[in-house]
Image (cartoon, rainbow, N blue to C red):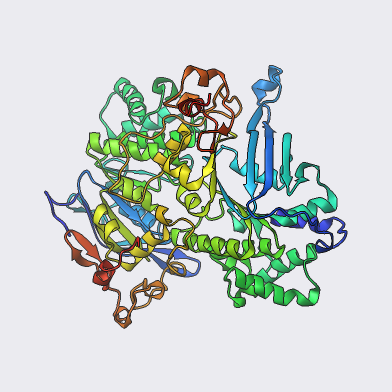
Amino acid sequence: MGGMTMELSTVDLAAPAQATEPLTRSAPGEPVLVVEKLTKTFRRPRSFADLVSGQPPRRVHALTEVNLTVRRGETLGIVGESGCGKSTLARCLVRLHRMDSGRVTYDGLDVGGLSGTALRRFNRRVQMVFQDPYGSLNPRMTVRATIAEALSVHRMCARRDMPARIAALMDMVHLPQSAAGRRPHEFSGGQRQRIGIARALALEPDCLIADELVSALDVSVQAQMVNLLLELQERLHLTVLFIAHDLRLVRHLSHRVAVMYLGRVVELAETEALFARPRHPYTRALLEAAPELDPTRRGSTEAALKGELPSPVNPPPGCAFHPRCPAAIERCRVVRPVLAPLSDGRLAACHVAAMEDGIA
Amino acid sequence: MMHDNGGPLLSIRALRTTLATEGGRVTVVDGVDLDVQPGEILGLVGESGSGKSMTLRSILRLIRPPGQVTGQVLWRGRDLVPLREAEMRAIRGREIGMIFQEPMTALNPVLSVGAQILENLAAHTDLGRAARRARAVELLNLVGIPAPAQRVHDFPHQFSGGMRQRAMIAIALASNPTLLLADEPTTALDVTIQDQILKLLQHLRETLGMAVILVTHDLGVVAQSCDRVAVLYAGRVAEYGAVGPVFATPRHAYTLGLLRSVPDARHARQPLRPIAGAPPPPDTVGATCAFMPRCGFATAACAAGRPPLVPAAEGRLSACIHGDRLEATEWAA
């Protein structure tokens, strides 16, 4: 975010953001962010051996035809292990990465085609907050200056109203007013996270993308942040994309949850349905592997999932999960399952689950 | 403390570790008392700065001077604290092994994984050259590395994070340790890989009878893989006991606060009841209970002094004078 704001401050600023605000706003519960067949690959630097043998550069398939709908006012949780593409997805959504193909629309606006003022306006409405606030805050700027910069770059309010607005924002994230003159290193991890959120909220966004927001924090501070997120969402009617690897946190915060594996969404369901009865074998393994807090309910002595994530350079044919899947059938090795509704309306990309429901 | 059968393997008393920093000497371990029974998995849990990793390092005296370790670390009846470095080396890495959070920094990047196991085998066993080679492959197989006969020649960078941790465990196991110290061994790993490593540690404990001290900040990891737990706060043990009872009826307000900070599946999207504030920096704890400023149960009596770790219930110890009041609070309610 820091990076984004910096870049923006160097470009020509056209009309103030509020004056040109589009009036198209979806109602609560309606789809607001729609992702269709989003694909993103990264070029890998060629190894010496590849250069000598004239191999073409290899590509990492970070996201492959991801489909996703986020509804206004909801929290959509995105879980998956490292390398599943969840952070790449977040970055594509806010245009920190350009997608290779596919379409992302926000309130009907084609995000991929935005530029100039329209892109800045979009960036204001959809704000990203990062895991490492230390890396995204300017160490030489006080909290007051950090928030003031965001306010002035996007011309959020008149200069004379700024002190009051900064005070209100700090209040909103429960930072004491006495903190305004201090710099990032004087704060604890949790408080820095609050500064990052205050800066994001300065732009009055309607969507917050939180990428591993609380992952690096201690459990007591994590819980404080969870409460803050719940409170802010209620108060500001935010749409939240909560990306995390911690299943307990995702379950607690999300209305719906998308599970990703090797660059694809493999299951998307209402939170309770997903946790009560996971249908994709990967979701099942993930839930089983997550250590439960109740020592009287110990899992089996066998690991929930054998093997490791296959290479995203050469994803397996058919279902990407089949080499590790205990339920895999012949079809899984050959035909790639698509994300489609099961009998209870949830989405899953699994041949076996579809067959169980008499769909495929 | 407990002397169930034949006494503890490791018995720590009044362990105190200080480090020299630019701002002067700070106390990072402030009087830890702990027992480890043979073959058990003891969890050390606490937030950052609670002293859990420093306790682990102090056991093996992995504290660089001018850092200082005082107190008593009785290893099979012998105090490790006053030992000379040469004597310490016969125990460190041999009778007591250690694995770390980030295996890549603990492994030697320019030696193959096999060479690093061989090194340990040569240093700590009487095996001949051929037997050592066979044993290295056997150890890699034991920790679940596929195709061990080939992978033994691989270098650490050719291994994934989970595989590196397995390789670290194989190196530690080369000396047949009686106790393994594991410092956040799964913190950097994905949940399914964490699950694999924790199951592996439990399996090794079963088959080799090795005791493990597992340092973690994840209460779920403790609940699922430890026999006993010591909850650390501000460099001291706040509560100690078997995992089941400690989780069911915490006898220290800090343990209760930690448990309440974790989201509970039955109350989705409800505000949590976290501990307010953050843990105190070292050496800022006055003559009161260290947790008092953050504690919802605190009374004037808590200011009277740091409460000692005393028996609180069958086989349990707590350093909280309000243990009985906590018992009346249903923490998950």
The picture places residue B112, in percent across and down from the top left corner, at 46, 29
B251 w.r.t. B98: above or below: below
Residue depicted at 34% across the width and 23% down the height: B133
User: Is B64 in front, or is A129?
Assistant: A129
Query: Which quadrant would residue A337 be assigned to in this image?
Result: top right
Does residue B205 appear to the left or right of A264 in the view shown? left
A33 w.r.t. B150: above or below: below
Residue depicted at 24% across the width and 67% down the height: B309
Does residue B314 appear to the left or right of A271 in the view shown? left
User: Is B156 in front, or is B39?
Assistant: B39
The picture places residue B215, in percent across and down from the top left corner, at 36, 51
User: Is A310 in front, or is B62?
Assistant: A310
Q: From the image, which quarter does the N terminus of chain B lie in?
A: bottom left
Residue depicted at 35% across the width and 46% down the height: B182
Does residue A251 appear to the left or right of B89 in the view shown? right
The picture places residue A200, in percent across and down from the top left corner, at 67, 61
Q: From the image, which quarter does the C terminus of chain B lie in?
A: bottom left
User: Is A174 in front, or is B99?
Assistant: A174
